[in-house]
Amino acid sequence: MNELYIDLKQKIEQAQSIIVFSHVSPDGDTLGSNIAISLMIEKYFGKKVDSVYVGTLPSLYTYLPDYTRFIDVQTIDKNTKYDLAIAVDVASKDRMISGTTIYDNAQFRVNIDHHKTNNGYGDINIIDGDAACVGIILYNIFKEWGFEIPTDVARCIYTSLLTDTGGFKYENTSPETFMLAAELVRLGVSPTYEFRACYETKPQSMVQFQAYIISNAIFYNEGKIAFAKITRSDMSKFNASDDFTEGIVETLRTSKNVEIAAILKETKEGYTKVSLRSKNIDVIPIVVDFGGGGHKFAAGCTIKKPVAIAFDKLLKRVQDVIK
Ligand SMILES: [Mn+2]
């Protein structure tokens, strides 16, 4: 067995208090993985687990089993010393925002991730940059531990897989991802139910908000670049929550000529949160210039400038790589 998996099992057995962290602006992978490992620890080790989120918890994933288990990190005393802290899908420690202190204070820290940019900030680092999602890594861990995976946990892992492969269509979709999907369906997951719950339950105002943002997108370099701005006033006009922007950048990329698409979203602090998607170009070097990270064709960063200024800076940088 992979030694790290044995170490992790031992640490869970020794721990009395356990906390599992998801990253800020949580997606299906970090949330599905969080519930999956929390449920497995509770079921097979008989220990209570605090599953926490930082920032806002999207309503999109309320269909996940045991979703109400999530607690806001801000409700936990900053001086709490957990025996074991586990981060799932957290590319860098600062993506736990105000939770970073609690993570650091833990007696032992585990870092389970699939971002190539992860620097190994944990005491145990289980990082597989080739895994399509953290859910796959967890599945392999549970299998190696010899535990049967209940349907609830299979559903969480399926959501990790479904969302991080963009519905089995991103570059990370491989024989391995389909094998896992098949196995999860065998364990009781309904692909139809999960797809509808995940992709076809948007509030009407979200559909209209997205249409508005997309219709105001600007295309450059013969349509190879698509940029869309999202200001706080756009957000308030549609009474939009943070998750309303999910999927917009992918829609921009559906345009035939688009090589790189970006959304630039004004944060509460007046900074600019950028999500970049590309078809063939590695965008990691672009976001790294702005202190960000992510995957080859899907990456992001926060530029500490107002949207209008960030827009011009990023456009220049993107135009450097688009001929
Ligand atoms: Mn992920």
Image (spheres, rainbow, N blue to C red):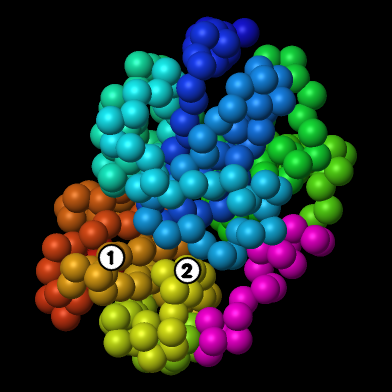
Please name the amino acid that badge 1 sits on. Answer: Lys
**Position of residue 38 measured from the top left corner of the image (x, y, whole percent):** 60, 33
Check disc 2: other Cα within 10 Å, few if <14, some if 14-19, many if 20+. Answer: some
Q: Which residue corresponds to the image point at 46% horizontal and 53% vertical from the top-left?
A: 26
Say the numbered circle drawn on residue 173: none
Q: Mark 1 points at which residue?
A: 273
Magenta-span inclusion, residue 230: no
Query: In this view of the protein, can residue 299 be seen by the observer?
Result: yes
Residue 102 to residue 125: above or below: below
Q: Which residue corresponds to the image point at 50% horizontal and 54% vertical from the top-left?
A: 27
Q: Mark 2 points at which residue?
A: 243
Query: In this view of the protein, can residue 312 be seen by the observer?
Result: no
**Position of residue 133 measured from the top left corner of the image (x, y, whole percent):** 55, 41
Disc 2 Cβ-to-ligand 1 distance below 8 Å: no
Q: Which residue corresponds to the image point at 84% horizontal and 38% vertical from the top-left?
A: 187
Q: In which quarter of the image is the C terminus?
A: bottom left
Q: Earlier in the sequence, mark 1 or mark 2?
A: 2
**Position of residue 259 measured from the top left corner of the image (x, y, whole percent):** 40, 69
Please name the amino acid that badge 2 sits on. Answer: Asp
Residue 270 to residue 193: above or below: below
Q: Which of 196 and 254 is in front in this view?
A: 196
Q: Is mark 1 on a helix, strand or loop?
A: strand
* Snapshot quadrant of residue 37: top right
Residue 71 located left or right of residue 310: right
Task: Tell me the magenta residue range.
Answer: 192-208
Magenta-span inclusion, residue 195: yes
Check disc 1: other Cα within 10 Å, few if <14, some if 14-19, many if 20+. Answer: many
Q: Quadrant of the N terminus?
A: top right
